[in-house]
Amino acid sequence: MAFDSIRALFPTFHHFVDSTLAARVNGFVRGYGSIREILYELEEWELEKEQLTRAKECLSSLKW
């Protein structure tokens, strides 16, 4: 499930809920934007290299 995959990227539920990634994916699910746009935006977010890699892998592997 997409929720579980993305949630696993965060140490706590609070971090997940407050994340830009969760907000952007929620918007995508509601018809705003695309996964491609989120992947592009990830490069501009202040993420550590490992976090960026994990986020990209997670989003790229999701089946919608």
Image (cartoon, helix red, strand yellow):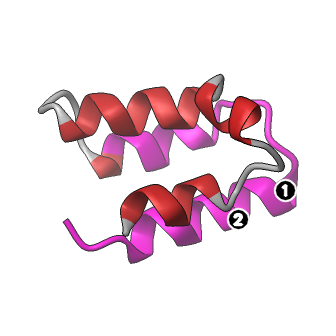
Q: Residue furthest left?
A: 31
Look at the image and tell me in which quarter the C terminus lies.
bottom left
Q: How many marks?
A: 2
Q: Percent from the top left, x then y, of residue 22?
A: 50, 36
Q: Residue at left 66%, top 62%?
A: 8
**Residue that mark 1 sits on:** 49
Look at the image and tell me in which quarter the N terminus lies.
bottom left
Label 2 with label 1: CB-CB less than 8 Å: yes
Up the image or down, 63 lies above or below 9; here it is below
Residue 24 drawn in magenta: no
Which residues are the magenta region?
A: 37-64
**Residue that mark 2 sits on:** 53
Q: Residue at left 65%, top 37%?
A: 16
Q: SS of the residue at dot 2?
A: helix
Q: Percent from the top left, x then y, of residue 23?
A: 46, 26
Quarter residue 37 falls in: top left
Q: Residues within 10 Å of mark 2 (few under 14, many from 20)?
A: few
Q: SS of the residue at dot 1?
A: helix
Q: Percent from the top left, x then y, of residue 49?
A: 84, 56
Amino acid under label 1? Lys
Residue 38 numbered mark, or none:
none
Up the image or down, 41 lies above or below 52; here it is above
Query: Label 2 vs label 1: CA separation?
Result: 6 Å
Q: Main SS of the magenta segment?
A: helix
Residue 57 drawn in magenta: yes
Q: Residue at left 58%, top 27%?
A: 20
Nearest to the observer: residue 3 or residue 23: 3
Amino acid under label 2? Thr
**Would you say 1 lies left or right of 20 here?**
left
Quarter residue 61 falls in: bottom left
